[in-house]
Amino acid sequence: MDDKRMDEEKYKMAKKRVEEIKGFYGHLFSYIGVNVVLITINLVTSPWALWFYWVTVFWGIGLFWHAMGIFVFSKFTGMSWERKKIKEIMEEMEKKEK
């Protein structure tokens, strides 16, 4: 029973991770698509006043931090960290009950 519960927990954590990665790729494709449209609009309507790069730069910064959160910082605060922290808190709670 305990192994089954652990497998379910691992499945839930893996599913959560996949959803996070999927969310990032959705963000990335939105960034690319919207910026292509904005660049086209800017260059067709007012090529002398380039404003599209503001959106591209600031949204790009947000996209960069999203990627860092998913692929870099998750190593420090990701699933294994969550699992360890949950176990630690449960052990503390058990000690207090005794």
Image (tube, grey):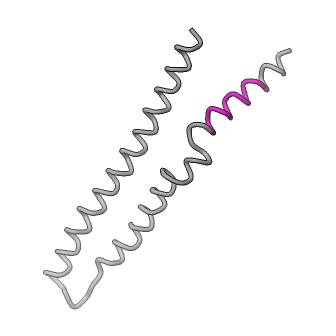
Position of 9 with respect to 47 (left or right) is right
| Percent x, y of residue 22 | 36, 44
> From this viewpoint, which residue is outermost toward the top?
1
User: On the image, which quarter does residue 61 sit in?
Assistant: bottom left
- Quarter holding the N terminus is top right
| Percent x, y of residue 82 | 61, 36
- Tell me the residue at 45%/63% (across/down): 64
Overall secondary structure of the magenta section: helix
Position of 34 with respect to 63 (left or right) is left
User: Which residues lie in the magenta part?
Assistant: 81-91
Tell me, yes or no, whether the highlighted magenta stretch contains residue 85: yes
| Percent x, y of residue 67 | 45, 56
- Tell me the residue at 26%/68% (across/down): 35
**90 or 81: nearer the eye?**
81
Tell me, yes or no, whether the highlighted magenta stretch contains residue 14: no
The vertical placement of 86 against 22, above or below, is: above
- Tell me the residue at 67%/33% (across/down): 84
User: On the image, which quarter does residue 60 sit in?
Assistant: bottom left
> From this viewpoint, which residue is outermost toward the left?
44
